[in-house]
């Protein structure tokens, strides 16, 4: 792609920025494989022919009605990089996403495995295909307003079906033998999955269940099966109070101290999503980096061309998180600033930082 090679003098800086195709040491370089996965990503996001102003951050749902993902480019780039890094580091296991909606991010991670030649690793797609369930009663959990009404308010989440997503998987040229379908509410479908496959292991677990119990149900079943070096990705961490609460309770109860890290987004974009990388206390374990860099240009370092992937981990402070509430469709606030920094655990919240990011802050600040 010419945009990633520096041959972009005919483009305005605004166009260059909107497509996230900047150059430098913290942006993934162009190669045939990197260009291909970037083009595949943009097809998933409906960016090739439709104007989606928030395509980088996913701050609004995509136009057109037929998009298969609402995640946005930054989260998509993070998913690609996590899968590729886990493969490069030899982390065993498969990949799973809980809450696939119309399948887009799962398709992208499955295609990443395919491009890397990882045909023995499977992509598990877990979804109720009925939207978010009503929160259970009598649990003692105080639900956020989002959780209490999500099952009846966000009808777009119900606008899918397993047959629809399976059809689109064929249209996006995925290897059907590499896909596994986990249908039903997570409280039932995930325990049934591991009962059928008791030796199941994962290299990447991506959670997109939005609400408290959808997140907690997935953590309880899947995190013990995430292998050391693997990635736990939280699509909804900056957007759903219920998701954050579930994460903090689970981490506290299980003594998890790996740094929660925001999905990299250049200033002044609003932060969306977070992740951490599971480490090990086994003797001789080599701690693996939390920040995933732009790769070294070899196949096992597959990254979407131009994706923003700084490598220096730093604790986040208030002026590094954008304040305000950018509305995502109907009353679904992206929470920023002090709220996502007020964590009930000692590890705090981290981000991946670099010199380019510092330049962006001076440029826009």
Image (cartoon, rainbow, N blue to C red):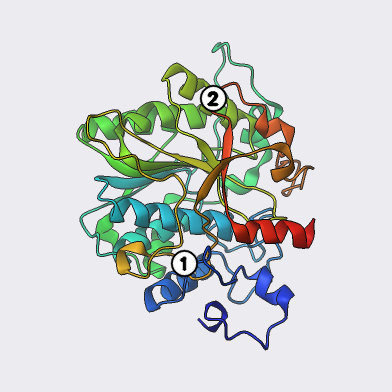
User: Measuring 47% from the left and 23% from the top, which residue is drawn there?
Assistant: 250
Q: Is 188 in front, or is 277?
A: 277
Q: Give the image location of residue 73, x and y in percent.
A: 57, 60
Residue density around tag 2, few if under 14, some if 14–19, many if 20 or more, within 10 Å: some
* Residue position marked by numbered label 2 in the rendering: 248
User: What residue appears at the point 64 percent right and 44 percent down from the top-left corner?
Assistant: 155
Which image quadrant is residue 50 in?
Answer: bottom right
Viewer-nearest residue: 47 or 364: 364
Residue 236 visible somewhere in the drawing = no
The residue indicated by pointer 1 is 304
Q: In this view, does 25 lie above or below 59?
A: below
Q: Position of residue 62 (x, y in %)?
A: 65, 60
**Residue sitting at 41 percent across and 59 percent down?**
107
Pick the quarter of the image with the C terminus.
bottom right
Which element carries disc 1, helix, strand or loop?
loop
Query: In which quadrant of the rendered view does residue 63 lie?
Result: bottom right
**Quick check: 113 left or right of 79?**
left
The image quarter containing residue 244 is: top right
Give the spatial CA distance, label 1 vs label 2: 31 Å
* Left or right of 256 on screen, residue 137: right
Q: Earlier in the sequence, mark 1 or mark 2?
A: 2
Q: Is mark 2 on a helix, strand or loop?
A: helix
């Amino acid at each position: 792609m010419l945009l990633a090679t520096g041959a972009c003098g005919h483009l305005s800086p605004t166009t260059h920025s909107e497509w996230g195709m900047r150059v430098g040491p913290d942006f993934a370089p162009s190669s045939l494989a990197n260009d291909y996965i970037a083009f595949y990503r943009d097809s998933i996001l409906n960016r090739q022919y439709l104007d989606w102003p928030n395509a980088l951050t996913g701050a609004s749902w995509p136009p057109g009605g037929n998009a298969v993902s609402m995640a946005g480019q930054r989260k998509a780039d993070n998913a690609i990089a996590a899968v590729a890094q886990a493969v490069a580091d030899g982390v065993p296991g498969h990949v799973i996403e809980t809450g696939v909606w119309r399948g887009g991010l799962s398709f992208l991670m499955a295609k990443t495995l395919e491009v890397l030649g990882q045909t023995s690793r499977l992509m598990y797609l877990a979804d109720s295909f009925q939207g978010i369930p009503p929160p259970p009663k009598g649990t003692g959990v105080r639900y956020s307003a989002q959780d209490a009404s999500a099952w009846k308010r966000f009808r777009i989440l119900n606008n899918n079906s397993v047959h629809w997503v399976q059809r689109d998987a064929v249209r996006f040229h995925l290897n059907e033998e590499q896909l596994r379908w986990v249908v039903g509410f997570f409280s039932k479908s995930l325990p049934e999955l591991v009962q059928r496959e008791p030796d199941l292991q994962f290299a990447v677990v991506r959670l997109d269940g939005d609400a408290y119990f959808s997140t907690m149900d997935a953590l309880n079943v899947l995190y013990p099966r995430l292998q050391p070096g693997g990635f736990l990705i939280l699509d909804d961490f900056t957007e759903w109070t219920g998701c954050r609460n579930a994460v903090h309770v689970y981490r506290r109860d299980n003594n998890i101290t790996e740094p929660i890290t925001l999905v990299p987004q250049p200033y002044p974009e609003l932060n969306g999503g977070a992740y951490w990388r599971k480490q090990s206390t086994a003797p001789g374990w080599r701690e693996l980096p939390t920040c995933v860099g732009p790769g070294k240009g070899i196949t096992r370092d597959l990254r979407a061309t131009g994706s923003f992937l700084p490598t220096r981990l730093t604790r986040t402070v208030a002026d590094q998180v954008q304040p305000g509430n950018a509305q995502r469709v109907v009353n679904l606030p992206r929470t920023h600033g002090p709220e996502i920094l007020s964590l009930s655990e000692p590890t705090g919240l981290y981000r991946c930082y670099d010199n380019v990011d510092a330049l962006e802050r001076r440029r826009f600040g």
